[in-house]
Image (spheres, rainbow, N blue to C red):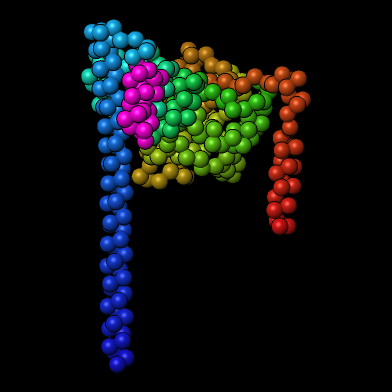
C-alpha cells in the first residue's frame, strides 16, 4: 500500500512537471500570438488610414473636395461606425497628410506601418527632412520608444548629436564594433534635467547626475546599465577612483565615464587610458569586449582632442555637455530646496511607518 502511494506521488509529480512545462509553452505561444496580432492590427490600421488619405487626395484633385466634404465624411463615418474612434475631421486631414508624405517613398511605407499612429503624427508634425524622419522611425522600432520618449529625443536633437563624439574607435576597435561604439556616443550631451550652477564642481555634477539617474540614462541612450560611481581600484598600493562605471548591453563592454567641469586637456587622455587598462585587467570578463572611455567636458577644442587621442591604444571618446542655466532669482526663491524636499520625504516616510 505504501509502495503504491509512493508510485502515485511520483506519477503526480511527473504529471505536475509535465503540466508546468505545458503551461509555460502555451503561455509563450499566447504572448507571441498577442504580439503578432498587435503588430498585425497596427499594420492594418496604418494601411487603412493611408488608403483613406489616398482617396481624399484623389478626390481633391478630381472633384475639388474641400473642408466641408471632409467634415461631412467624418460625420457620416461616425454615424455608420459609432463605436470606432479616429475619424474626426482633424484625423482625416492627418490621413491625407500621411499619404502625401510617403506616396513617393515606397521603401518607407512598410516601415511606418511598424510604429503606432500617434508616433507617426509626432514625426509628421516635427520632422520635415525625410532622412531625419527615417532615422527616428528606425530608432523607435529598434528601441521601442514610447511616444513621450520619441518627443523627448526629437526635442533634444538626438539625430544631429548621435555619433558626433570625437573618438579613436576606428584605430582601436575592430569593425563592426567600432561603428556601433561610435553610434552610442553623442556630442554634445544635454543635461537639461539639472538646474545647477554653470560653474559647478565635478563632485557636485556627479552627485546631481546620480540623483537624476533615470534622466541621465535616457540621455546616454539605450543599452547603458549603471554599475558604480567612484569605483575603487587599487594599483601598486595606491587608490584610484573612477567617476562613473557603466556596462553597455549591446556592445558587451564596460564604459568608463569621467566628468570634467572645464575644458579638455591632453593629459586627461593619458589618465583615461590608465583607467581602461585597469578595468580590462581587473574587472572585465574574458568574454567582454574592450572597455571604452567617455570623457564629458564642459568645453573641448577638436584639434587638441584629435592630437591627444592620435597614438592612444585604448578606445576613447570625448564629448561636451550642456547644463540648464541657473533659475532666475525670483523663481528660485519660490521653489523648495533639495534639503526641504528631502526633509518632506523623510517626514512622510515616518508618518507612514507609524500607521
Residue found 28% across the figure and 21% down from its top = 52
Q: Is residue 84 magenta?
A: yes
Hey, which quadrant is residue 115 in on the image?
Answer: top left
Front-most of 253 and 131?
131
- The quarter of the picture where residue 326 lies is top right
Q: Is residue 91 left or right of residue 346?
A: left
* Residue 343, position as x, y percentages in the image: 75, 42
Residue 77 picture quarter: top left
Instruction: Name the residue rendered at 53%, 20% in the picture.
Output: 320
Q: Is residue 215 above or below residue 284?
A: above
Q: Position of residue 217 (x, y in %)?
A: 50, 34
What's the magenta region? 70-90
- Placement of the C terminus among the 4 image quadrants: bottom right
Observer-nearest residue: 192 or 101? 101
**Quadrant showing the N terminus:** bottom left
Q: Is residue 136 visible?
A: no
Considering the whole magenta stretch, tell me its main secondary structure. Answer: helix
Determine the residue positioned at 62% across, 21% down. 324
- Quick check: 83 above or below 263? below
Magenta span includes 154: no
- Residue 122 in percent (x, y) is at 42, 22
Amino acid at each position: 500500500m505504501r509502495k503504491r502511494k509512493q508510485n502515485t506521488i511520483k506519477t503526480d509529480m511527473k504529471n505536475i512537471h509535465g503540466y508546468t512545462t505545458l503551461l509555460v509553452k502555451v503561455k509563450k505561444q499566447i504572448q507571441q500570438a498577442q504580439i503578432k496580432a498587435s503588430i498585425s492590427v497596427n499594420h492594418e490600421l496604418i494601411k487603412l488610414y493611408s488608403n483613406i488619405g489616398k482617396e481624399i487626395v484623389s478626390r481633391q484633385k478630381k472633384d475639388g473636395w474641400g473642408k466641408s466634404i471632409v467634415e461631412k465624411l467624418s460625420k457620416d463615418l461616425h454615424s455608420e461606425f459609432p463605436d470606432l474612434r479616429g475619424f474626426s475631421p482633424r484625423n482625416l486631414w492627418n490621413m491625407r497628410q500621411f499619404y502625401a508624405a510617403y506616396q513617393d517613398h515606397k521603401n518607407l511605407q512598410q516601415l511606418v506601418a511598424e510604429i503606432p499612429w500617434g508616433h507617426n503624427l509626432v514625426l509628421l508634425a516635427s520632422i520635415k527632412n525625410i532622412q531625419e524622419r527615417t532615422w527616428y522611425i528606425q530608432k523607435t522600432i529598434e528601441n521601442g520608444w514610447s511616444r513621450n520618449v520619441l518627443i523627448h529625443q526629437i526635442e533634444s536633437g538626438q539625430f544631429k548629436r548621435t555619433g558626433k563624439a570625437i573618438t579613436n574607435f576606428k584605430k582601436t576597435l575592430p569593425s563592426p564594433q567600432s561603428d556601433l561604439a561610435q553610434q552610442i556616443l553623442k556630442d554634445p550631451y544635454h543635461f537639461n534635467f539639472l538646474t545647477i550652477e554653470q560653474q559647478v564642481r565635478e563632485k557636485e555634477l556627479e552627485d546631481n547626475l546620480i540623483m537624476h539617474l533615470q534622466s541621465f540614462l535616457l540621455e546616454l541612450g539605450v543599452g547603458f546599465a549603471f554599475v558604480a560611481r567612484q569605483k575603487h581600484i587599487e594599483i601598486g598600493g595606491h587608490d584610484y577612483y573612477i567617476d562613473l562605471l557603466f556596462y553597455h548591453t549591446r556592445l558587451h563592454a564596460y564604459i568608463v565615464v569621467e566628468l570634467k567641469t572645464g575644458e579638455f586637456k591632453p593629459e586627461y587622455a593619458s589618465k583615461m587610458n590608465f583607467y581602461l587598462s585597469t578595468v580590462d585587467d581587473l574587472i572585465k570578463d574574458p568574454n567582454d569586449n574592450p572597455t571604452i572611455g567617455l570623457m564629458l567636458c564642459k568645453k573641448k577644442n577638436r584639434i587638441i582632442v584629435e592630437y591627444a587621442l592620435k597614438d592612444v591604444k585604448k578606445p576613447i571618446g570625448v564629448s561636451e555637455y550642456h547644463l540648464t542655466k541657473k533659475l532666475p532669482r525670483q523663481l528660485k526663491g519660490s521653489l523648495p530646496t533639495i534639503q526641504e524636499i528631502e526633509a518632506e520625504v523623510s517626514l512622510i516616510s515616518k508618518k507612514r511607518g507609524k500607521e
